[in-house]
């Protein structure tokens, strides 16, 4: 067993690195059971082809009759991504009794900052207004994201402009989860992200780190210590320190031997044993929802 496990880990890591993004997520979804949830696809939350979301209702909700709710925003440098690619995230959360909403949102070059945040906020507003009809608890809503999606979740949780513009207050969130998110990244180095934020004329107020206050909701921040794409110390560690200084409850977790991509990839059933990331996220959601794991 001690010899097979490292070999299997190496093969899985190699497959994630060598496969293209779409084929990788297809494989992870294919190898992840859908038995733990009921999916309600292609629900309309806004105008346009990208104004759609999928709802994944756990067959056994945590917290009694109504489940805690996570609205998950995928990454992709704000220029790629499809909600169906991340069914494996919803499947993982469903096994803990957590309901997941995964919206699409407009991407570059169709839009630039801050239009995708407007979409994200509309998706959260739709969730607050409609999720009770799917056995979700509208008083236990969290936002979560990986990479660029972690930025989106942070902005909605910390900068009141976006949720207020959609008719709800950030105080309506029970918490937020950021995995490998960029929270303090000016000047932008990544050439793909530069036009999204109007480089070099960066809009004021575009950095989540600048919006921390004592009113910010509780946070879970997770990083891979070897992340080569988004600096974990400048972004997540600094964010955790600033939240703590403001008196905001924050759970900060560092994980090793993964990568920027694998930090979310380990939510898939065949990779889950590599790291406790998904269990830690679920424990945070259940604790903030006053549920027992």
Image (cartoon, rainbow, N blue to C red):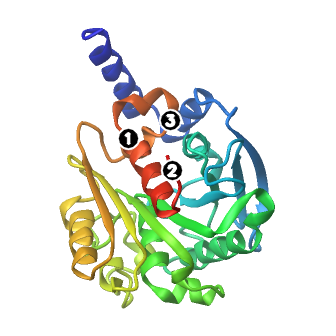
Determine whether 212 is above or below 229 in the image.
below
At numbered mark 3, what does the secondary structure look like: helix, strand or loop?
A: loop
Could you tell me which residue is drawn at 62 percent across and 74 percent down? 119
Label 2: state its secondary structure: loop
Q: Quadrant of residue 94?
A: top right
Q: Of callouts 2 and 3, which one flags the residue occurring earlier in the amino acid sequence?
A: 3
Percent of width and height locating residue 161: 51, 89
Q: Estimate the x, y position of residue 290 in percent, counting from the top left.
A: 51, 61
Q: Which mark is residue 21?
A: none
- Residue 268's tag is 3
How far across and down, in percent of the image, does residue 233 sit? 18, 62
The correct choice, above or below, for 204 with respect to 94 in the image is below
Residue 128 lies left or right of residue 224; in this view the side is right
Residue 235 visible at all: yes
Q: Is residue 110 left or right of residue 273?
A: right
Per the model, the C-alpha gap separating discs 2 and 3 is 23 Å
Residue holding disc 1: 262
Specify whether residue 75 is in view.
no
Tell me the mark number nearer the camera, choosing from 2 and 1.
Answer: 2
Residues 10 and 239: in front is: 239
Foreground mark, 3 or 1, reads 3
Would residue 101 appear left or right of 15 to someone viewing this image? right
Q: Tag 2: Cα neighbours inside 10 Å, few (<14), some, or many (≥20)? A: few
């Amino acid at each position: 067993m001690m010899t097979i496990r490292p070999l299997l880990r190496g093969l899985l890591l190699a497959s994630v690195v060598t496969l293209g993004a779409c084929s990788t997520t297809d494989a992870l979804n294919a190898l992840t059971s859908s038995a733990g949830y009921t999916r309600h696809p292609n629900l309309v939350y806004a105008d346009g082809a990208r104004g759609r979301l999928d709802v994944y209702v756990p067959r056994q909700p945590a917290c009694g009759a109504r489940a805690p709710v996570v609205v998950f925003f995928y990454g992709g440098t704000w220029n790629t991504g499809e909600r169906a690619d991340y069914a494996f995230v919803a499947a993982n959360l469903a096994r803990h009794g957590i309901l997941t909403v995964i919206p699409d949102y407009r991407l570059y070059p169709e839009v630039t900052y801050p239009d995708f945040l407007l979409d994200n906020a509309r998706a959260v507003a739709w969730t607050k207004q409609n999720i009770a009809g799917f056995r979700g608890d509208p008083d236990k809503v969290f936002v979560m994201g990986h990479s660029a999606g972690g930025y989106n979740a942070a902005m909605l949780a910390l900068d009141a402009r976006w949720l207020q513009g959609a008719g709800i207050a950030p105080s309506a969130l029970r918490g937020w989860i950021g995995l490998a998110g960029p929270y303090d990244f000016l000047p932008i180095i990544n050439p793909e992200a530069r036009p999204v934020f109007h480089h070099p004329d960066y809009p004021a107020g575009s950095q989540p780190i600048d919006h921390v206050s004592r009113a910010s909701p509780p946070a879970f921040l997770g990083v891979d210590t070897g992340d080569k794409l988004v600096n974990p110390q400048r972004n997540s560690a600094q964010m955790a320190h600033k939240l703590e200084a403001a008196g905001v409850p924050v759970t900060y977790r560092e994980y090793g031997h993964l990568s920027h991509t694998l930090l979310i990839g380990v939510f898939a059933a065949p990779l889950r044993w590599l790291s406790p990331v998904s269990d830690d996220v679920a424990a945070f959601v259940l604790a903030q929802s006053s549920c027992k794991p």
